[in-house]
Amino acid sequence: MDEVFRIIHQHTQGKRFSPIPAMVENATYVIIKPVLKNTNDVSVESIILDKDILYIKVKAFENPDFRPESRLSPNILLKLTGRVTFKKVTVK
């Protein structure tokens, strides 16, 4: 887990430091980096596994905790319940 957070935070500036999740044996961890366009943050709306593709839907929003002009794409660590097997991740 130390290596995961080293990668996540290697270029992180400002307040976007993620909490450290508890590691459990029966879980799957996925890191995504959605692109910010006209807002300064995103929230995860849904996660769907269809065949071998994991679809992650994100919704853009203005987060008052960050400067309005901030467009640094966040690294998001998702913890999925159970062992999830997939070959591709698609972020919409």
Image: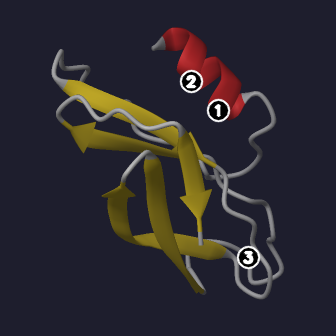
Q: Report which residue position mark 1 lands on.
A: 8
Instruction: Pinpoint residue 23: horizontal percent, then vertical percent.
Output: 26, 20
Q: CA distance from mark 3 to mark 2?
A: 24 Å
Relative to 45, say whether 56 is above or below: above
Instruction: Pinpoint residue 74: horizontal percent, then vertical percent.
Output: 65, 55
Q: Residues within 10 Å of mark 2 (few under 14, many from 20)?
A: some
Are the residues flagged by discs 2 and 1 in contact, CB closer than 8 Å? yes
Q: CA distance from mark 2 to mark 1?
A: 5 Å
In front: 86, or 57?
86
Q: CA distance from mark 1 to mark 3?
A: 21 Å
Type of the residue with mark 2 = Phe
Q: Residue at x 43, y 38 (%)?
A: 86
**Observer able to see residue 28:** yes
Instruction: Pinpoint residue 35: horizontal percent, then vertical percent.
Output: 75, 66
Which label sits in the foreground, 1 or 3?
1
Q: Residue at x 44, y 52 (%)?
A: 54
Q: Report which residue position mark 2 lands on.
A: 5
Q: Residue at x 62, y 47 (%)?
A: 75
**Observer able to see residue 21:** no
Q: Report which residue position mark 3 lands on.
A: 67
Q: Is residue 88 left or right of residue 20?
A: right
Q: Residue at x 32, y 30 (%)?
A: 28
Relative to 35, say whether 24 is above or below: above
Type of the residue with mark 3 = Arg
Which numbered disc, 3 or 2, marks the residue that appears first in the sequence?
Answer: 2
Q: Residues within 10 Å of mark 3 (few under 14, many from 20)?
A: few
Type of the residue with mark 1 = Ile
SS for callout 2: helix
